[in-house]
Image (cartoon, grey):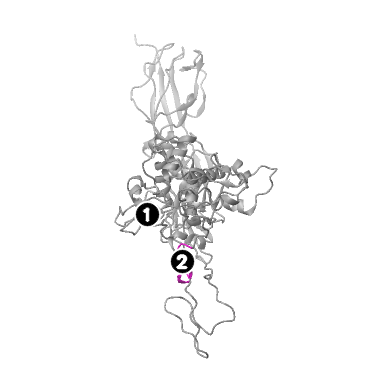
Amino acid sequence: MSAQAHFGRRLRKGAATTAVAAVAVAALAASQAPGVTTDNRGRQTTGSDSTPSPDNDDTATGNSRYYTDLPPLDSPSPSPTVGTPVSRGEAEAGIPATVLDAYKKAEASLRESKPGCNLPWQLLAAIGKVESGQARGGRVDASGTTYSPILGPVLNGNGFANISDTDNGAYDGDRTHDRAVGPMQFIPSTWEWAGRDGNADGKKDPNNIYDAALAAGHYLCRFDHDMSVQAQMNASILGYNNSTAYLNTVLSWLEYYRKGTHEVPDGTGTLPSHNSDDSSGSLPTPTPPATSAPPSKPAEPSEPGKPGKPKPGDGTSSPTPPASPPSTTPPPTTPAPTPTQTVDHLEDAGTGKLTAMAGDSFDKKVAVRTETKDGKAVAKVRVRFTIVGDATDATFSGGETVATVVTDKLGTATAPALVAGEKTGDFTVRATVVGRVMSGLDYTATVTARQADTLTRTGDAAPTCVPGGEFAEQIEVKATYKGAVADKVAATATLVKSADDATANDKGPYFKDADGKTVRTLTDLTTDADGVLKLPKLYADDTTGTFLLRIDTAGGATLTVELKVAAAAS
């Protein structure tokens, strides 16, 4: 099947409506994006090709063709009075898991690098729907790369722009003219400067949805455009494809996705069928077998009594003419299942006990294995690890609470290291297969309080004082745990009665509280970033003798310091 069957053709000058718009009713215009209008018969139109983008000299797509299918009338999240959504509405609201993940990651990246752009991921989803039907319904592998290239028409001036080859065929395989490439349909000359590495694999591949979505986000946000300002958003969309009809179609899908959407397994997204040249036709499978090639003419009848011979390469045979004419429609084909679709369950892959002190990294990592029903490992499958709930402030290394990992050749996916926050207690790490509806695996992780196993004094002078006086030296100790600094460790300090009696003394040295009152037990003490704890000043009453100061920390570290109160030598 030709590439023109994969995508719609850009409306030629003077075209006023699309095939889909001709049958939509006026009610949709009220529920869809700005710019969608109705004619005097109540039909919906996405406008005509007219006003160019005022501040963009070129476009991302070379004004290539696109899909014109509009969202269904039913919102994906209707009001209670509307009732249950129709099946088409539910299906159209679904976005393939990996594709949806790419859009959301691109939004998060732009939120940090270009916060003033206010880019919503739903805008990327709307453009992805119009440009490629969400990467042919999510026909992408675990890394987000399409199973076969998505190419627009040859831009040779025949109904489209005339763009001579700029990449020597590196991206589009054409050394004469350029073609739009990938799920977001970048022409090679634009991708050369706009391309991004969205999945951190060291490459900028227009056929990868993570790379293409991030590149599209940066392209829309150039010129410091703010997507929260409608006029600036419109200018950015027109810069992507210079067509008012295109603008209104994208805005329709943007509004639809903003009302609600959901994740569907990869490869199961709905496929557009209406093109911007008013033709119809569903997308083929990304790797059509020989039987899906355009059918040839029926073979000439064989001589009576002799069986017909098949013509080489036409995939048909020529027996004695049948009673009815042969069908000109190729038989439907079932695409081979993706690796993700073969996964039946998740198995633990040697995850150890998940325990760490607050602020520390966990020694063990969560590891799972994707397996088929008969227990065979499945490689190149995306596994999502999620820290569940608000009971913890733990994260994965890098500060995220969600991490997606592709299984290796043994079918194993290992999550990044967990880093404990300050909240103590248990939390859950959940592993699920991206693009597959099936049970996940839950792991319990525990965060304990910070601890110290050793306390030492930072000075060696013996603390002494005269009756009724003030100790010259403030007691300072340092806490460590397994030889490392034990910072932010809770501690108490008590002036005890004796080595065998840890209750607070009622005479001898003492501390003062904020009101100047006598205090012989200090709680809520904490070591600093260097593991050091410096106690307040000590004072003595009129009792002489040797007294004990005991310091205890979480984890069991204890240090006892002798304090002497004696009259001054004459």
Numbered circle sitting on residue 288: 2
Give the vertical position of 250 relative to 3 (above or below).
above
Residue 157 disc label:
1
Where residue 413 sits in the image (x, y, percent)? 44, 55
Label 1: how many Cα within 10 Å (few below 14, some 14–19, many 20+)? few
Nearer the observer, 292 or 426 = 292
Q: Residues within 10 Å of mark 2 (few under 14, many from 20)?
A: some
The residue at 34%/27% (across/down) is: 458
In the image, farthest residue toward the left = 168
Question: Which residue is at a point 45% across and 71% down the rendered structure image?
Answer: 290
Q: Earlier in the sequence, mark 2 or mark 1?
A: 1
The residue nearer to you, when weighing 164 against 397, is 164
Q: Tag 2's secondary structure?
A: loop
- Dot 1 falls on a residue whose secondary structure is loop
Main structural element of the magenta stretch: helix, strand or loop?
loop
Mark 2 vs mark 1: in front: 1
At label 1, the amino acid type is Gly
| 356 vs 141, nearest the viewer | 141
**Is residue 305 visible in the rendered structure shown here?**
yes
**Tally of numbered tags:** 2
Residue 210: mark in rendering:
none
Image spot of residue 88 (x, y percent): 61, 53
The reply to whether the magenta stretch includes residue 514 is no
Q: Amino acid at mark 2?
A: Pro
Q: Which residues are magenta?
A: 285-294
Residue 224, how many percent across, how many down? 40, 34
The N terminus sits in image quarter: bottom left
**CA distance for labels 2 and 1:** 28 Å
